[in-house]
Image (cartoon, rainbow, N blue to C red):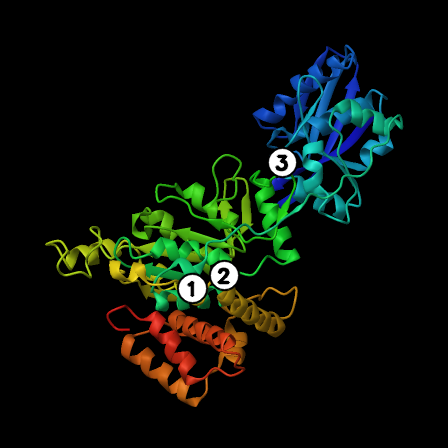
């Protein structure tokens, strides 16, 4: 008789159900695993054998075959240990068949039978809830998986505890959800001296999720400004927190099962590889752009990133998802992030300062900033020149308005957008609006439309640039509490779109 257990295989953030079939039949003693397992899954037989031996459970001198169905789906990871052990114990009549078959299990076994934590407990719990099954996972993963309220989660610490639960010797209580991580102490915008135009751009970017580029000499405060962005953003909604936590679960970044309401802030170094940024590598893991989903991706020294890496950002910026293509699968990860980038105007950084610029100016600036392609630059809504701060300005008193005051306006603007687009839809911020939706919500008044038309003709705006100005103008109007997009809103949006020499 074939015994069944169930587990999951991950394809991006989707957890696909896998049926673990175990047959114990007469024949030469052997223990084989089939169904396209990787090296970690194939080695499960040794961990399972040692764990059962430590519990004084001897395997029969028969042929044991484990089949992972569907057989054409690649199986990767050590989380297959526990379901394989359960299917084998059911086949040996140690555990009841029906109880094992009603469970989705995942967990890595140590040689002593302890259950080690694995990644992906949160999406696995969602898959178990969809199948109306109980999730069995290691105790260290229970707090994370229990965030799925519709799923019953049982989290034993050892295989022996799992056996006692199934046999009724010791029933384990359901796992409880971990703690909600509160916001960390954010850096305050009040620490930044001067740079009022850059602060205003930060506010607009936070309110409408508009991509932002700071350009200026070294020490002007570009990175300092970008580091203040998390303090301006509203906390994650429950839906957004679950989306983001599923990705972080697959990356093994959830701390003790806690789900954070703080928006992620990712700042990869410019030496990062393409798989590190967009996803891929062994197991096609999520990259930095997906780990920044619903949060901020900060790319400091933007021209220093390899050109192929920067070009791969173009499609995710437009679509909000990235596809990691492999020969046998296409894995999708969400990546709806807010891009904040910083760049020096040239290699030496002092192009805008005639007394300090190198002898190659202005050619060095054109060559350096030319590493950022026009199509990528066209996707950045706000382009701000950050001038140097005089040392005399550093002695000025702190600004009267800090992050809390700006964040309050951002929350109010986001609330207007939520009321406009509705809860639970694809559109969440003004940056997501396009087509007829954008035309209906961001149509400027007659004076604003005339100004935008003249700016498009004079500066050669692309159709994408035209629509991005409309989105920014809509956000500026939301910050002002205006239902209508007027000429001043359009004028300010245009000023952020133009090159520094023209604005």
| Mark toward the viewer: 1 or 3 | 1
> Considering only order in the chain, which callout, 3 or 2, is on the residue closer to the N terminus?
3
Residue 101 drawn at (x, y percent): 81, 34
Q: Quadrant of residue 487?
A: bottom left
Near-viewer residue (420 or 67): 420
Residue 4 drawn at (x, y percent): 79, 31
Say if 278 sits above or below 211 in the image: above
In the rendered structure, find residue 72 and report the number of the disc placed on it: 3
Say if 469 sits above or below 217 in the image: below
Q: Residue at x 77, y 13 (%)?
A: 59
Q: Residue at x 77, y 26 (%)?
A: 86
Tag 2–tag 1 contact (CB < 8 Å): yes
> Considering only order in the chain, which callout, 1 or 2, is on the residue closer to the N terminus?
1
Tag 1–tag 3 contact (CB < 8 Å): no
Question: Which residue position holds label 2?
Answer: 232
- Mark 3 closeness class: few <14, some 14–19, many ≥20 residues within 10 Å: few
Q: Residue at x 20, y 57 (%)?
A: 365
SS label for mark 3: loop
Tag 2–tag 3 contact (CB < 8 Å): no
Residue 12 drawn at (x, y percent): 58, 45
Q: CA distance from mark 2 to mark 1?
A: 8 Å
Question: Which residue position holds label 1?
Answer: 202
Quarter of the C terminus within the rendering: bottom left
SS label for mark 1: helix
Residue 273 drawn at (x, y percent): 39, 41
- Mark 1 closeness class: few <14, some 14–19, many ≥20 residues within 10 Å: many
Would residue 135 be found to the left or right of residue 433 on screen?
right
């Amino acid at each position: 008789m074939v015994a069944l257990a169930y587990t999951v295989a991950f394809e991006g953030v989707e957890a696909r159900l896998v049926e673990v079939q175990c047959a114990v039949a007469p024949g030469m003693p052997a223990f084989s695993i089939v169904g396209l397992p990787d090296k970690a899954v194939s080695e499960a037989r040794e961990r399972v054998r040692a764990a059962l031996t430590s519990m004084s459970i001897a395997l029969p001198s028969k042929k044991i075959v484990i089949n992972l169905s569907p057989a054409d789906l690649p199986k990767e990871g050590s989380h297959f240990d526990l379901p394989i052990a359960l299917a084998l114990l059911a086949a040996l009549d140690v555990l009841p068949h029906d109880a094992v078959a009603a469970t989705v299990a995942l967990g890595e076994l140590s040689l002593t039978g302890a259950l080690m934590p694995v990644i992906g407990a949160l999406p696995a719990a969602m898959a178990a809830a969809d199948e109306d099954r109980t999730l069995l996972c290691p105790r260290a993963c229970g707090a994370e998986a229990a965030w799925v309220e519709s799923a019953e989660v049982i989290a034993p610490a050892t295989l022996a505890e799992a056996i006692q639960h199934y046999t009724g010797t010791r029933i384990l209580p359901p796992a409880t959800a971990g703690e909600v991580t509160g916001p960390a102490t954010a850096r305050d915008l009040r620490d930044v001296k001067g740079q009022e135009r850059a602060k205003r751009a930060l506010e607009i970017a936070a309110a409408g999720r508009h991509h932002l580029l700071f350009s200026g000499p070294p020490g002007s405060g570009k990175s300092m400004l970008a580091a203040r962005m998390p303090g301006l953003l509203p906390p994650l909604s429950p839906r957004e927190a679950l989306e983001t936590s599923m990705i972080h679960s697959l990356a093994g970044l959830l701390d003790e099962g806690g789900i954070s309401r703080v928006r992620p802030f990712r700042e990869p170094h410019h030496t990062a590889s393409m798989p590190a940024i967009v996803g891929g590598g062994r197991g096609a893991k999520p990259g930095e752009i997906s780990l920044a989903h619903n949060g901020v991706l900060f790319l400091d020294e933007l021209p220093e990133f390899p050109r192929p890496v920067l070009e791969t950002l173009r499609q995710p910026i437009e679509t909000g998802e990235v596809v990691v293509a492999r020969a046998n699968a296409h894995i999708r990860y969400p990546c709806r992030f807010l891009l904040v980038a910083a760049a020096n105007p040239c290699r030496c950084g002092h192009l805008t300062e005639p007394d300090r610029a190198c002898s190659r100016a202005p050619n060095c600036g054109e060559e350096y900033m030319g590493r950022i392609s026009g199509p990528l630059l066209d996707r950045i809504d706000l382009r701000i020149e950050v001038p140097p701060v005089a040392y005399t300005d550093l002695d000025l008193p702190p600004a009267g308005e800090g992050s809390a005051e700006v964040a309050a306006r951002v929350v109010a603007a986001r609330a207007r957008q939520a009321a406009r687009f509705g809860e639970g839809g694809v559109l969440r911020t003004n940056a997501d609006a396009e087509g007829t939706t954008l035309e209906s919500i961001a149509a400027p008044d007659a004076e604003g439309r005339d100004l935008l038309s003249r700016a498009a003709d004079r500066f050669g705006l692309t159709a994408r640039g035209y629509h991005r100005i409309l989105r920014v103008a809509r956000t500026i109007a939301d910050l002002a509490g205006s239902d209508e997009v007027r000429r001043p809103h359009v004028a300010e949006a245009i000023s952020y779109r133009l090159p520094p020499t023209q604005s």
